[in-house]
């Protein structure tokens, strides 16, 4: 019996445990998949199941429904294949059809009611602790402003998600959103990445290149890892923040942009300022609004919500159902201090499922909770195997420079090692890592 799972980004919005012949998609609350955006029609599209096949049709919507990039004619149904992509502006729903679901045995932790889980969401962020409710509130308050926002918080707390939510809750949502990770780009190249260059600006510049600020004109730019910038980049940033102008590298023409700047860092900027590595005036400009994201250990039972969420996400992908977990394992997760925050929790859950072939519940022993600061002994750090190397890179979110710091080598050495192991860092940074 084939079953359907529908993802919206990383969230499951329809899962195989729900049996229904018609799945309604639209803006109004009584749809099965609710897409709250003004561009979505009230009852936009429907997925129907017939004789073990799934079909989708557009319900006469204003802006159309696209199946694998082709617009559907109104009311004419098309069959979904194993991996279909449905685009309903501005959302992309990823469908997955799973055949032959394994039988479930043993006790299972009751899944949270989906409706309940939904109400703990703020967009793509999950959590209902006081600390997180405060964050949602702040996002809501500042989203429609034009002033810069600085997002601060430990590594893995969800700063990228917050930036995205500010963007989607704001009034520039139909304009470009350009994200740039300052930590992942060699520091000396960042300034050209941001501001572009003219033809002939330096050897190798054989054509004009438009920078990210220009790309983000009328929209939003997200400067991640803002602490990792050179003085010359900081000067140029200060200027564009002050009066919205800059020059392309090697250019004479003053360029004007209207771009909202959101930046993020997990570094102690005050210390960088005191050490003369970060300009105080730039800090003042960037932090007109500041959002502090609490570490996971200060979010109480959000750990359990997130555990459930990741179990569902990765378990559904792998087994087609929610995996079981023992009470003791849950307790261990709840008590752990999570130095790597949500990212670490996610990778612990993912890893605990990696080698599970059967339906036995996840036990305490299946949870490998190495502290990101001391997971690897000296010999591993000196000469990591490919899986160890991948794990190290995962822990630092594929940031070459951070990996280099952790291993005590140069970024070039990380690059060389990646090449030797056939790991395409550039692709992974762009598209994410797919563990084979
Ligand atoms: N509240 C949340 N709900 C669901 N997923 C979350 C939440 N917070 C973080 N995540 C997930 O955790 C991972 C880490 O989040 P993110 O990349 O935003 O962290 P970060 O704060 O930018 O970390 P760093 O400082 O290391 O760059 C991502 O996969 C993200 O989707
Ligand atoms: Mg980040």
Image: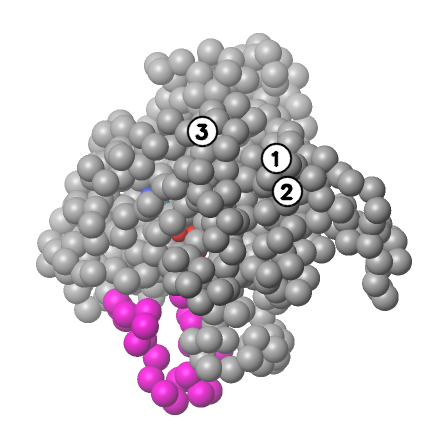
Q: Residues within 10 Å of mark 3 (few under 14, many from 20)?
A: some
Instruction: Name the colouring of the figure.
Output: one colour
The image shows residue 249 at horizontal and vertical percentages of: 77, 54
Residue assigned mark 1: 259
Q: Residues within 10 Å of mark 2 (few under 14, many from 20)?
A: many
Image point (59%, 41%), residue name: 241
Q: Which mark is residue 345?
A: none
Say whether disc 3 or disc 1 marks the residue closer to the N-terminus: 3
In front of the other: 328 or 48: 328
Q: Nearer the viewer, mark 3 or mark 2?
A: 2
Q: Which mark is residue 240?
A: 2
Q: Which mark is residue 143?
A: 3
In front of the other: 2 or 71: 71
Q: Nearer the viewer, mark 1 or mark 2?
A: 2
Question: Is 214 displayed left or right of 204 in the figure?
Answer: left
Q: Is residue 66 above or below residue 127?
A: above
Q: Residues within 10 Å of mark 1 (few under 14, many from 20)?
A: many
In front of the other: 350 or 322: 350
Image point (44%, 16%), residue name: 27
Residue 414: in sight, yes or no? yes
In front of the other: 127 or 111: 127
C-beta proximity under 8 Å, tags 1 and 2:
yes
C-beta proximity under 8 Å, tags 3 and 2:
no
Q: Is residue 245 above or below residue 249?
A: above
Magenta residue span: 368-396
């Amino acid at each position: 019996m084939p079953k359907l799972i529908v993802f919206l980004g990383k969230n499951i919005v329809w899962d195989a445990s729900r049996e229904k012949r018609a799945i309604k998609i639209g803006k109004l609350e009584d749809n099965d998949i609710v897409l709250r955006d003004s561009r979505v029609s009230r009852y936009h599209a429907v997925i129907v199941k017939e004789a073990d096949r799934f079909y989708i049709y557009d319900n006469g919507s204003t802006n159309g429904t696209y199946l694998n990039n082709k617009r559907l004619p109104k009311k004419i149904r098309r069959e979904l294949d194993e991996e279909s992509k449905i685009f309903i502006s501005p959302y992309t729903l990823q469908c997955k059809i799973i055949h032959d679901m394994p039988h479930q045995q043993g006790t299972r932790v009751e899944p949270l009611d989906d409706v309940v889980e939904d109400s703990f969401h703020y967009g793509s962020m999950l959590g209902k602790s006081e600390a997180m409710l405060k964050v949602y509130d702040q996002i809501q308050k500042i989203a429609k402003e034009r002033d810069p926002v600085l997002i601060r918080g430990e590594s893995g707390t969800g700063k990228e998600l917050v930036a995205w939510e500010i963007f989607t809750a704001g009034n520039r949502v139909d304009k470009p959103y350009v994200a740039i990770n300052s930590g992942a780009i060699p520091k000396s190249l960042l300034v050209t990445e941001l501001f572009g260059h003219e033809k002939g600006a330096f050897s190798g510049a054989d054509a004009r290149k438009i920078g990210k600020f220009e790309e983000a004109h009328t929209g939003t730019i997200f400067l991640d890892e803002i602490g990792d910038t050179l003085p010359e980049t900081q000067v140029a940033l200060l200027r564009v923040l002050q009066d919205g102008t800059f020059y392309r590298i090697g250019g004479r023409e003053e360029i004007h942009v209207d771009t909202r700047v959101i930046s993020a860092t997990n570094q102690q900027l005050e210390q960088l300022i005191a050490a003369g590595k970060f300009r105080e005036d730039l800090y003042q400009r960037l932090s007109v609004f500041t959002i502090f994201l609490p570490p996971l250990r200060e979010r109480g039972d959000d750990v359990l919500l997130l555990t459930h969420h990741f179990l569902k996400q990765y378990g559904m992908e792998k087994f087609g159902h929610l995996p079981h977990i023992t009470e003791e394992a849950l307790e261990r997760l709840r008590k752990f201090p999570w130095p790597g925050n949500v990212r670490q929790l996610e990778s612990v859950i993912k890893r605990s499922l990696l080698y599970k072939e059967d339906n036995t519940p996840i036990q305490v022993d299946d949870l490998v909770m190495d502290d990101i600061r001391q997971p690897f002994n000296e010999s591993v750090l000196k000469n990591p195997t490919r899986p160890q190397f991948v794990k190290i890179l995962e822990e630092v979110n594929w940031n070459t420079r951070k990996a280099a710091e952790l291993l005590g080598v140069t970024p070039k050495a990380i690059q060389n090692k990646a090449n030797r192991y056939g790991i395409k860092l550039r692709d992974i940074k762009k598209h994410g890592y797919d563990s084979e």
